[in-house]
Amino acid sequence: MNDKDKEIYIRGRGAQSNPHNRFIKNTFVMDLDDLPTEEEREEALLHNPKTKFLEVFPKTLVNKVDSPDLKGMWSLNPYQGCEHGCIYCYARNSHEFWDFSAGKDFEKNILVKKSAPSLLRQYLSNPKWTGEPMLLSGNTDCYQPGERQFRITRQLLEIFYEFRHPIGIITKNAMIERDIDILAKLAADNLVHVVLSLTTLDEDLKRIMEPRTASARNILRTLRSLTDAGIPVSVNAAPMIPAINDSELFDIIRVCSEHGARSVNYIVVRLNGAIAGIFEDWVTKNFPDRANKVLNRIKSMHGGHLNDSEFGRRMRGEGEWADLIKQQYDLAMKKFFPDIKLFEYNRSLYPQYRNRQYTLF
């Protein structure tokens, strides 16, 4: 990063730009007389505006994920947008549907679904629902910083326990330890499986790549805490970015095994939609000496493009660099996870507890 970029780099945020929303046809610009001076622009960038929380009122909460990669999973997200600021996040593009940018807007304008608990209770009370496992954080993290204030995820877990309904959780925030009491009760009946995301063990890299997530040290502590409480936990080492964090995959798998993980999965980076430009701006500012190398290696894994939308292949990539990452993964898994047992949700309790809740009315 050169001296000029250091002066205006927004600390504590991932995206450093706000690309145009593809769904907005018109572009609005300021009159020449109203444009800020260079000094005013830098002052505005340095004094980072606070996050805005905007309540929204959805009619539905649960969505079916029509992706062969996720095998027809059902998901729910109490928040849209994510303050964690992960530069590579595939969910950034979804913010454009709300008339925001996939860049800085995604991190600063968080949509809050306070009605989520009542919507979930209504959904689980439906006699036509068969009780298929759901996923919290299929799009954005349910334990992002705003959860400390709104506690929506906590309320959702209480309802899942009332109905004895199977639930999966993906997060990269140590705040999940707050809910160990409910998670342990769900785990006692094989109703919950947690996946922690750990992208790097390098704390300096983590602070610029995913600035508002928990530190690697705290993620590992959380892994051990959940495991000791009898809660099954796996780890996603995702995404692997060539020339950024891919060389750490072996060590990530090793330390996760030492802290009690059931297994580790990995996904290679792909930069779909507006994320390509956001990432390119970020990598150029933070790693100018190897930005081209990083981008070219990503392209080499996706047929010459920064993105690949082909189901199955998009998660692992192809070509030399994808093969090297896979070889590292296979070697580490053979050494540290020689006997993986797949987690199976208990779906037998939900029907009787749904009927029990229904009779209360």
Image: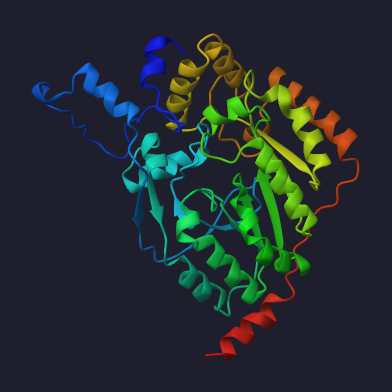
Residue plotted at (57% across, 86% down):
358
- How far from the left and from the top, in percent, is residue 93? 43, 39
- Whether residue 234 appears in this view of the structure is yes
Residue plotted at (71% across, 18% down):
320
User: Relative to the observer, which residue lies in front, 26 or 210?
Assistant: 210
Depicted 103 relative to depicted 357: above or below: above
- How far from the left and from the top, in percent, is residue 127? 58, 80
Whether residue 9 sits left or right of residue 303 in the image: it is left
- Whether residue 237 appears in this view of the structure is no
Outermost residue, left direction? 33
- How far from the left and from the top, in percent, is residue 74? 59, 59
Number of numbered discs on residues: 0
**Quarter of the rendering containing residue 213:** top right
Depicted 350 relative to depicted 222: above or below: below
Colouring scheme, one of rainbow, by chain, secondary structure, one colour:
rainbow
Residue plotted at (77% across, 59% down):
229
Residue plotted at (46% across, 65% down):
116
**Quarter of the rendering containing residue 331:** top right
- How far from the left and from the top, in percent, is residue 98? 34, 48
